Amino acid sequence: MILPEAPGVKTFCFKTTDDSWFKYFPGQFITIELPTPGEKLLRTYTLSSSPSRPLSIAITVKAQRGSLGSQWMLDHVQVGDRFRAYGPGGLFTFHNHPAEKYLFISAGSGITPMMSMTRWLYDDGAHTDITFVHAARRPSDIIFRAELERMAQRLPDLHISFVIEEDDPYVAWTGYRGRLSQLMLPLMAPDYLEREIFCCGPAPFMQEVRDILHSVGFDMEHYHEENFLAPVLAESEREEPDDVIPDEDSRAAVIFAASGVEAACRETDTVLAVAKAAGLNIPSACQFGVCGTCKVRKLSGEVHMVHNGGISDDDIASGHILACCSNPIGRVEVDV
Ligand SMILES: Cc1cc2nc3c(=O)[nH]c(=O)nc-3n(C[C@H](O)[C@H](O)[C@H](O)COP(=O)(O)OP(=O)(O)OC[C@H]3O[C@@H](n4cnc5c(N)ncnc54)[C@H](O)[C@@H]3O)c2cc1C
Ligand code: FES
């Protein structure tokens, strides 16, 4: 099934070929192989569906200007097409942060993990207290609006607020207008300081949300966010560099043992980039250490890896690295 959700946004629903059930946590993602002309692209999408309905999964795709993979999906995928997908993965789920009251804040396609979690909580019937805040350019861009409003009519503790930047012509809008602000948030969720907050949207939007929360002294232990693109952090939010810092002038080398290739590089190059330059293919999708697609085994040597949750401590302990966010320090040998 393929459902149009909003201008430039579609939901794609998938089943397995043998009708087996899907198991995942609401808020997790999959990485899907797209057979675009010329090359296979890997792209990561949050499952907008809920594991409470396990016979199928859904992803909801929005293409930005200049998009290759997502636009290809919107233009070419047809009912009956088959895809290879990997996962599920990701830590952005309330299962990791149980609370009595949640505040979901999203913008644009960042609504997908919030929708999965809300669908799950709705099906669960436990009457969890959810305030759902979503920002969109226009009312017609609000993804899942009708379903959210229907759920809110049946769940007394689901409160929805939409904020838009522009009106749709000839359509009345009685909700919030402008950009989500420090004045607006308490009107939408008077007790927001007591809530477990999940946020997903474009980097500047999430920065604004973090700024609001920092300014009121919110305990950021209770704030969780998901980046769809490489995260952009304000100077004050950057963590102190650890003991090993890759040096642009220091020479390094990556030995791709299974391919019999040795490539000289700089310490600031990633293992993924070195492989690509040497004509080797390490499958990759997000390229900022969240999806886990580029995981490879390190056989010897040292890397400086700054990931975003795409690899478990067990995998690291067993010698694995994410090639997209690992810089070789000196000579490093990988099983590629
Ligand atoms: C964990 C995770 C979950 C995700 N979940 C979803 C989801 O539920 N729905 C969804 O639609 N996408 C989701 N994404 C994003 C998706 O994986 C693609 O990365 C994104 O759509 C860009 O791929 P593309 O092929 O469209 O564009 P590309 O061809 O890779 O990029 C084309 C150009 O557009 C720019 N660009 C791409 N995306 C954006 C953006 N969002 N904002 C600004 N510029 C952009 C790029 O910088 C590039 O210059 C998720 C990503 C991650 C990592
Ligand atoms: S490509 Fe996603 S973690 Fe490396």
Image (spheres, grey):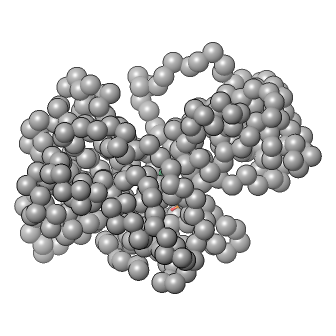
Q: Residue at x 28, y 65 (%)?
A: 143
Q: Quadrant of the N terminus?
A: bottom left
Residue displayed at 56% across by 19% down:
241
Q: Where's residue 294, x and y in %?
A: 66, 48
Compared with 214, 333 (above or below) is below
Image position, residue 95 (x, y; %): 35, 43
From this view, report whether residue 100 is shown above or below residue 302.
below
Q: Residue at x 73, y 52 (%)?
A: 282
Q: Residue at x 7, y 55 (%)?
A: 156
The x, y position of residue 14, in whole percent, is 46, 73
Q: How many marks?
A: 0
Question: Does any portion of residue 184 appear in the rendered image?
Answer: no
Give the residue furthest to the right.
260
Q: Residue furthest top?
A: 243
Q: Is residue 250 left or right of residue 73?
A: right
Can see residue 22?
yes
